[in-house]
Amino acid sequence: MTTKLKWLNAQLSQFELLLMSYLKRHDISRSHVQNYVNSGWLEVVASGVYKKPSQNISWSSALAALQFQHDCSLHLAGLSSLAHQGVSHYLTLGSETVQLNSPKTIRLPKWLFSQDWQIEYKCSKVLGKVDQNDLIELNVNNQTVKASIVELAVFEMLENIVDESSFVFASELFQGLTSLRPRRLQSLLERSPSIKVKRLFLFLAHYYQHPWLKRLDESKIEFGSGNRQIVKGGYVDKQYQITVPLRYKQDTLENG
């Protein structure tokens, strides 16, 4: 067996998908790849994307390839990250919607959406730059993927609130977040440019009186000015100047 073929087999034991750009960087040309396809060593998934014949692939195969072979800033985010870290019961077997975020707009390859995967992509404004400490490596479907840490995933979930229904869903999940890490939260709150997310996060933290709240220093957080409407037809919370559903006015534990 040639050296190139040994290397290829080693990569296929780690990745379920191989990208042509990655293969080229390791001195495997298109003619080599075509020979491997003709010989049955590789199978074409899409133009420039290959897998081992008969290998089942999933969205995590694609994400791992993009992250580790293409150096893509994409990461598993929000509810998807929380679910795969055991924080929420968001996943429904067979109908998983996968949330992928990046801190800047990127053009995702068409082949990512050509498979039978339910993928939602968002250029998130929660952070201007995602550091390595903001991510964690998870094993999903036998592939290693980078995902937002729980604290960042919560911020990403709050960013996606658009109406009362999504507010209530997020609030109910937030109620169980009793063990978030204050240092990670403080860092995110100080670095995040999203006024909406920061105000909403602290409103819910006060609403549920989570124990880690006492260890946050709100004097170091930039909250901007003016009201932010989170939902229509609600009431304006005076402390954080956000419009939230009326039910949270009636049940607020400590507010303003």
Image (cartoon, rainbow, N blue to C red):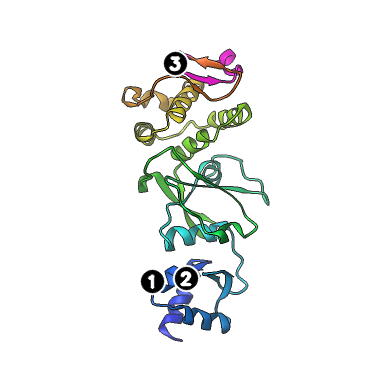
Residue at image location 65% in from the left, 57% down from the top: 116
The answer to which of marks 1 and 3 sits earlier in the sequence is 1
Decide whether residue 243 is among the magenta residues. Answer: yes
**Callout 2 crowding tier (Cα within 10 Å): few <14, some 14–19, many ≥20:** some
Mark 3: secondary structure: loop
In magenta, the rendered stretch is: 238-256
Residue underneath mark 2:
20
Image spot of residue 130 (x, y percent): 38, 45
Residue at image location 46% in from the left, 76% down from the top: 8
The answer to which of marks 2 and 1 sits earlier in the sequence is 2
Displayed quadrant of residue 194? top left
Residue underneath mark 3:
239
Mark 2: secondary structure: helix
Mark 1: secondary structure: helix
Image spot of residue 94 (x, y percent): 68, 52
Residue 37 appears in view: yes
Decide whether residue 227 is among the magenta residues. Answer: no
Q: Which mark is residue 25?
A: 1
| Amino acid type, callout 2 | Met
- Which circle, 2 or 3, is nearer the viewer? 2
Image spot of residue 167 (x, y percent): 58, 28
The answer to which of marks 2 and 3 sits earlier in the sequence is 2
Q: CA distance from mark 2 to mark 3?
A: 53 Å
Check contact, mark 2 vs mark 3: CB within 8 A.
no
Q: Is 5 rendered above or below residue 49?
A: below
Q: CA distance from mark 2 to mark 1?
A: 9 Å
Residue 253 appears in view: no
Q: Is residue 182 left or right of residue 91?
A: left
